[in-house]
Each structure stands twice: as C-alpha cells, then as structure tokens.
Image: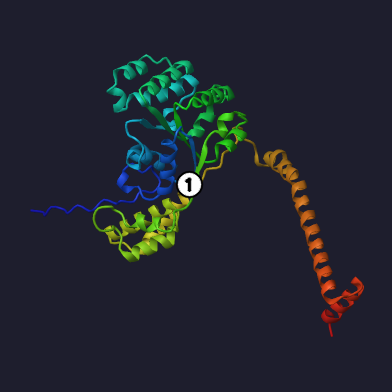
Amino acid sequence: MSLPRTSRPACPFVAGPRIDDPCCFVGRKEELKFLADRMKGIQPISVNVVGERLSGKSSLLWHFTNTWAQMGPDPSRFLVVFICLRLAKPKTEAEFYRTLADALSKLRAVEQCKPLRSTLAHFAKSRKEFGEVLNSLAEHGLLPVFCLDDFEKLFDHKDELNKDFYDRLRGLMSTNKMMLIIATRKPLEICGAEQQLQSAFFNMAQLCELREFSEDEPEELLCLPVSGPPALDLEERQIAKSWGGKTPWQLQLAASFLFEARQSGKSTTWAKQQFERERGRLLQVPEQQPSWSVKPWLRAAFVDFPRWLGRLPLRLGRYVDDTANLIMGWIIILLILACLFKYAGIADLFAVIWAHVKPS
C-alpha cells in the first residue's frame, strides 16, 4: 500500500501574466493611492497609467478594481469596472459604448437597481444613449470608473475610432459623470501625436508612471505569502534581489525559479539558468516586419541605403556641433589661464605651454 503524497506548497510568485489574486499583489501603494485620490475629489480626474511592457499595468488596474473600496472612497458612490480592450475588441464607436455598458450591467449594484438595469437593457449603443446612461447613474448618485487596459488596441481601427470619436468621448467626460483610468505604454499625448489624432482627449488625464519598486517593496514581495512563513529563506531572498533588482516582474521571475529549485531539489545554478533564459525570452520583442516581402539586395538598395542617407545630415550635424563645442571649450580654458597667469598675449601663453610639453 503506497503512502499518500504530501502536497507541495503553491508558488506565490507570478511572473508575466496578470496577477489576479490580491494576496499575491505587492507594492505600488503610492500608485494605488494616486488612483483612489483622483476618485474621491470634488470631481473625478481621469488618469493615464503609463508603463513599459511587463511593468504591471494590467495587474495594477485589476488589483485596483478589486480593492478600491478598502482605500477610502465611499463604496456606495462608485461603480468600478475593469475592461481589457485587447479581449473586448471594439471596432466601432457603438461597440465601444456597448462594451462599457455591458461591464456596468454585470455589477451587483446595477443588478439590484431595477431602473438602472432597465436603462442598460434598452441601451442601443449610440453616444447619445450612453450619455443618458451616465445621466441615469448620476441621478442615483453613482460615478462609473472604467479601468481600460490595452487602450492602444483602439488604434487598430482608426477608420471608425477616429479623431471625431475621441472628441465625442472627451465631450462625455467633460460632464464629470464618468472617470477613465487608461493603461498605455506611452503617455496619451504621445500616442495621439503618433497616431495623428489631434484631439483634446489625449491631454485630459493626469499621468501615473509605473517605475521600479521603492526601497522596501522588493523585500515585501520576496516575503510572500502574506499568511505563513516566507516561501524563500533569507539567502534565497538576497539572491533573488541580486538577480531582479527593483524590477517587479524580474523579482517575481527570480523568486519563482528559486522556489521551484528548492521544491525540486535542484541547484541555484539551475535556477539562474532558467531565470536568464526566461528573462531573455520575455524581453525579446518581435520586430514588426513590413507587410510586403523583398529580396535582401532590393531592401538594401531601396530601404536601408536611403534610410542611412537620410540620417547622414543629422550625424554630420552632431559631429560639427561636437567639434565646435570642443574648440570653444579650449578657447575658454586658454582665456582663463591667460587671466590667471596675467599674460599679455595668447602667443606668450602658447610658448610657455609648449616649453612644458615639448620633448627634451
């Protein structure tokens, strides 16, 4: 008769995917407070959460959606929903408003209010009717807060979701009857300029940048789980910090492989190899290829060479600028020396300098 296997503890570290379990989310206290403070002011202030790939934007928005009531805002006043636009895939203005309305209709506060439920049930996707939805929510003292992840996916449909769409969305926001928390890799104003969408919408949000952890947050993460003893011992936590620094996803990755190495009886060397391999894979961003394919010599002749030629004036300008700066710098140095040594002429100064540096 075989003995029952003892179950291994679950790994509390999550690297890469969105962190869904609030108990596994650590840090970002300042950022979470920033979002909550913009909700509970006299009027809502929309926020643009900006961070590079893997910086934790999705995890932050998801965690905020599930824990905002613990941060001070009146729970009876707000309707906070998380929407991943990469999954929702709205291609038109009507589909975008329908996506927002559907997310609201699933909230318990809306399900329990018959007039609101009826308003959303008869919503026909137009901007005007979405405005009426916002008015109905305001009459019941409710402010919807839409946490929109992967906002750049809207730019894939610029024929429909064009400047007029963003202008109209900005018009709805000017009524202060909804708040947006928008996650992007670059600030919205830069996104708008790159997409040639000159709308006031792209200047309406306050910026919340996701950077590295603060001094104390790496140790807090590496001491997971919240309940019970840390999954890693002191030495393993120091190793994880030396590998991952203050970058949240790299700390998660290092800790997860160190945890797996301990559970599997493998060495720290094995964990380091796995960490480096997976880190390199996650950092590798596939380069966008042109939609047309050409032979290498054609690409070199008609793409690479003209591109190099176009950059040449800039490089020459930098070279000329650097040379001019160097000459001007030496002139300033010589003038200072002339003043210090009280020489009447620059020629005398050069003679003295040459006397000291010439070969004997």
Q: Label 1: which residue? A: 210
Q: Is residue 242 above or below residue 40?
A: below
Extreme residue toward the bottom, this view: 360
Instruction: Say if residue 128 shows up in the picture.
Output: yes
Amino acid carrying mark 1 in the image: Leu
Nearest the viewer among 174 and 89 is 174
- Could you say which quadrant of the image residue 139 lies in? top left
Classify mark 1: residues with Cα within 10 Å, few (<14), some (14-19) or many (20+): some
Nearest the viewer among 89 and 230 is 230
Which residue appears at 59% of the width and 25% of the height? 163
Q: Is residue 43 above or below residue 230?
A: above
Nearest the viewer among 16 and 217 is 217
- Could you say which quadrant of the image residue 198 lies in? top right
- Could you say which quadrant of the image residue 76 lies in? top left
Q: Residue 231 in the image: x percent, y percent?
A: 28, 57
Instruction: Say if residue 274 shows up in the picture.
Output: no
Q: Residue 358 in the image: x percent, y percent?
A: 85, 80
**Residue 277 shown left or right of residue 348 in the figure:** left
Extreme residue toward the left, this view: 1
Q: Is residue 285 above or below residue 76?
A: below
Q: Residue 239 in the image: x percent, y percent?
A: 39, 63
Q: Residue 185 in the image: x percent, y percent?
A: 52, 41
In what element is the residue under mark 1?
loop
**Residue 47 shown left or right of residue 195 in the figure:** left
> Is the C terminus in the top left, top right, bottom left or bottom right quadrant?
bottom right
